Amino acid sequence: MLRSMSSRLFILVLASAGALGVNFALRSPEGATSTAPPAVRPNPAQESPPPTAARVPLREAPAPTRTPPVPAEMIRYPDGTFMPPLNGVKQPALLHWPPEEPFSPIVGKQMAGDVEWYVHADGTQSTTQMVFRSDLGREVAVTHVARPLPVRPEEPVEGSGKD
């Protein structure tokens, strides 16, 4: 009986510790207060500068086409145009453009490290590349869409003396 009660107590303590850990792990960073000195914190009235990628000079991208000779060897964009894949990919995966976002045309290309990206008019970037999948034991083509978002200014927390 004593062993059974100590097992139950152990399980209860373990479950409580796990729940507490999950609570801390899932806590929203919005509720956290900044430890940066006031001089370094962003001013909510100021807009954040555009992403660094927007300042990189763009290279010319090929013109999009609506009638590619071999569509399976091209990236199909939501406006019905096709572009050649990047980074040595021969048969790109499907592009999944965010459905809630209007399509933005390609205005150029740029390098980020050793990965080439198409840059769209709204700052969105898209690319294709080969990635090794250990579960398959081989490389597969992947297509990425990256959309820069503005940094939200820090909001003061009531009662913290920072309002």
Image (cartoon, rainbow, N blue to C red):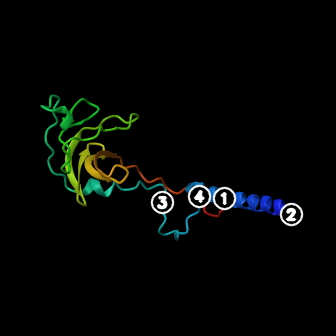
| Left or right placement of residue 19 versus residue 100 in this view | right
Q: Nearer the viewer, residue 51 or 79?
A: 79
Residue indicated by mark 2: 2
Q: CA distance from mark 3 to mark 1?
A: 38 Å
CA–CA distance in space, label 4 to label 2: 34 Å
Given this view, does label 2 or label 1 mark the residue nearer the observer?
2
Question: In front of the other: label 4 or label 3?
Answer: 4
Q: Residue at left 25%, top 46%? A: 128
Mark 2 against mark 3, which lies toward the viewer? 2
Mark 4: amino acid: Ala
Q: Disc 2 residue type?
A: Leu
In the image shown, does 67 or 137 lie closer to the viewer? 137
Which badge, 4 or 3, is on the more N-terminal residue? 4
**How far apart, in angstroms, are the residues tagged by discs 1 and 4?**
10 Å
Mark 4, other Cα within 10 Å: few <14 / some 14–19 / many ≥20: few
Q: Amino acid at mark 3?
A: Asn
Q: Earlier in the sequence, mark 2 or mark 3?
A: 2
Q: Residues within 10 Å of mark 3 (few under 14, many from 20)?
A: few
How far separated are the C-alphas under marks 2 and 3? 60 Å
Mark 3, residue position: 43
Q: Which mark is residue 25?
A: 4
Q: Amino acid at mark 1?
A: Gly
Question: Judging from the image, what secondary structure is the residue with disc 2 in?
Answer: helix
Q: Residue at x 29, y 32 (%)?
A: 78
> Splitting the image into 4 quarters, where does residue 57 fall?
bottom left
Residue behind mark 1:
18
- Given this view, does label 1 or label 4 mark the residue nearer the observer? 1
- The location of residue 151, given as percent across then percent down, is 44, 54
Horizontal side, residue 70 vs residue 14: left or right: left
